[in-house]
Amino acid sequence: MFISIDERAAAWFTNEFEFNKPFCIRMFPQYAGFGIKHKGYSLAFSVESPVHVGYSKEINGITFFVEDNDVWFFEDTETSLTMDNYLDEIMVTYHERPSLTVTN
């Protein structure tokens, strides 16, 4: 699991949620939409405090996190949050990461 968030995307969260830093953004699968990674699921965000962190990353005063029970959504994937320059909205892309296999 790897999640990258560029600085422009992090700034979008500051503007969109109108919170003063520091604050936390939970990233979680939401059963709705036309999910690219998992059919029927899309990536959702909310401002809340972590309970059982499975992954976290701090960028410019914002802690992005995934709860333990949501890690399945991100497994074997590189998830990138960037800005769509044309729409001026957050853009999420997924790239499959090959599983590591150990041979003797």
Image: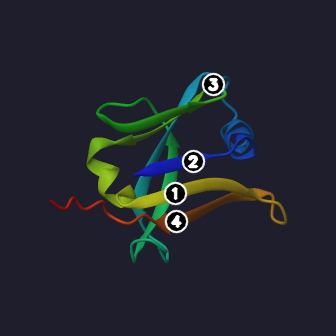
Labels 4 and 3: the sequence-earlier one: 3
CB atoms of marks 4 and 3 within 8 Å? no
Residue with the mark numbered 1: 79
Report crowding for label 4: few under 14, some 14 to 19, many 20 or more residues within 10 A (C-alpha): some
Question: Which residue is the site of mark 2?
Answer: 4
Question: Which corner quadrant holds the C terminus?
Answer: bottom left
Near-viewer residue (92 or 51): 92
CB under 8 Å between discs 2 and 4:
no
Residue 61 image label: 3
Residue 4, position as x, y percentages in the image: 57, 48
Pick whichever of labels 3 and 1 is earlier in the sequence. 3
For mark 3, give the secondary structure. loop
What residue is drawn where x is 83% and y is 60%? 85
Residue type indicated by callout 1: Thr
Name the amino acid type tagged 2.
Ser
For the residues bearing labels 4 and 1, Cβ distance under 8 angstroms: yes
Earlier sequence position, callout 4 versus callout 1: 1
